[in-house]
Amino acid sequence: MTWEERWHPLREEWVVIAAHRQDRPWSGDTLKREQKTLPEYAPDCYLCPGNPRVSGRSNPKYDQIFVFDNDHPSVALDAPQIEQPAADIYKSRPATGIARVVCYSPRHDLTLTELELPQIERLLGTWQEQYAELGERPEIEHVLIFENKGDAVGVSNPHPHCQVYANNFVFRTIENEVQTSKKYFIDTGDVLFQEIIRAEQQDGRRIIAENDSAIAFIPYFARYAYEVFVAPKETHPSIAAMSPKEVGDFADVLKSVLVKFDNLWQMPFPYVMPLHQAPTDGGDHSSFHFHIEFHPPLRKPNLLKYLAGPEIGGGNFLSDTSPEEKATELQALPSIHYKETKG
Ligand SMILES: [Zn+2]
Ligand SMILES: [Zn+2]
């Protein structure tokens, strides 16, 4: 049983791996879970084609991917001006930005996992366009694309979609990775993320999927039980810089990971999935290596990883599982989705 501290080089912090604390590994029985069967179209879903949204606007009868400005945006170009300036050390400013929603498919009942490869590739194309278009704007410093999936992370509408936050600041995690990558490059002349990929390939135990130009692995320093990184092998600051061949390979590896996730407990696997992309603040981010991180909240089908004293109180993660063991579980799973194998 792994019991040690591991250094997270992108965050420059220790992760405590205390796998000796967990119960016996989950046996692998199929979960007897009530699976809600969703309709292909839901009349009361604000993301389904043709349906009205809270703004009063209606969705077009889209048949592929549909992008729109969020009706309840956290940031907006017309966010209110600050009326009362903050006193002394406090500061405030308008919440300037653009918030969008991307519907992956007109089908209410599908998830990213169940989309066909060409549809996933098309979605990656949409992410490229959104990053390029929004990042181009002078008031936008960073584009955060992310999907929250499942009740476990507070998502009530199952319609497959992600969000785009184009903000006037760089999110903290990205800023952190930018700084560590830059520092590493100045010190060594190498790209930090390349070194991580190399280390994972040399070890091999935590690789979940790999092809010509893309790779997925549970990093050595994983903070969540089933935390998976998906990345192109070449360094690109953003998804927008990837070639069509790389996008195809990336889609393929991404799909394998997603299918394994669902197959793990034979249920739609919940996660927070951010794209980690370089800021669009005009700086030199050539040492930043685009990747997707999956942060799954569950350790077992009905067991949440609670963020508590160490994580919220102290700011460092305590993981109750060993990355090698969790990678072995995922590696052993079939690459065909369980719904397809059931007649
Ligand atoms: Zn829907
Ligand atoms: Zn990252």
Image: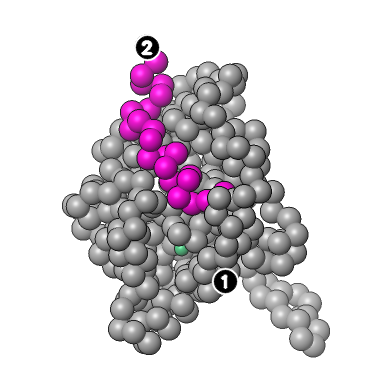
Which mark sits nearer the N-terminus, 2 or 1?
A: 1
Q: Quadrant of residue 197?
A: bottom left
Query: The C terminus lies in which quarter of the figure?
Result: top left
| Mark in front: 2 vs 1 | 1
* Front residue of 335 and 35: 335
Q: Does residue 128 appear in this view?
A: no
Q: Is residue 273 above or below residue 240?
A: above
Residue 334 within the magenta-colored segment of the rendering: yes
Residue 272, labelled with which disc? none
Relative horizontal placement of residue 154, taking residue 267 as reference (left or right)? right
Location of residue 176 in the rendering, given as x and y in whole percent from the top left corner: 52, 74
* Residue 98 location (% of width, % of height): 52, 60
| Amino acid type shown at disc 2 | Gly
Q: Residue at x 69, y 49 (%)?
A: 306
Of 108 and 257, the residue lying toward us: 257
Q: Real-space Cα distance between discs 2 and 1? A: 47 Å
Q: Residue at x 57, y 65 (%)?
A: 5
Which residue is at a point 59% across and 42% down the rendered structure image? 299
Helix, strand or loop for disc 1: strand
Q: State the residue in front, 43 or 251.
A: 251
Does 236 sit above or below residue 112? below
- In screen coordinates, is 42 left or right of 132? right
Q: Position of residue 221 (x, y in %)?
A: 49, 61
Query: What amino acid type is highlighted by mark number 1?
Result: Glu
| Secondary-structure class at tag 2 | loop
Q: Which residue is mark 2?
A: 343
Give the residue at mark 1.
13
- Crowding around mark 1 (Cα neighbors within 10 Å: few <14, some 14 to 19, many 20+) is some
Query: x%, y% of residue 33?
Result: 59, 21
Is residue 206 something one can see in this rendering?
A: yes
- Bounds of the magenta segment: 321-343
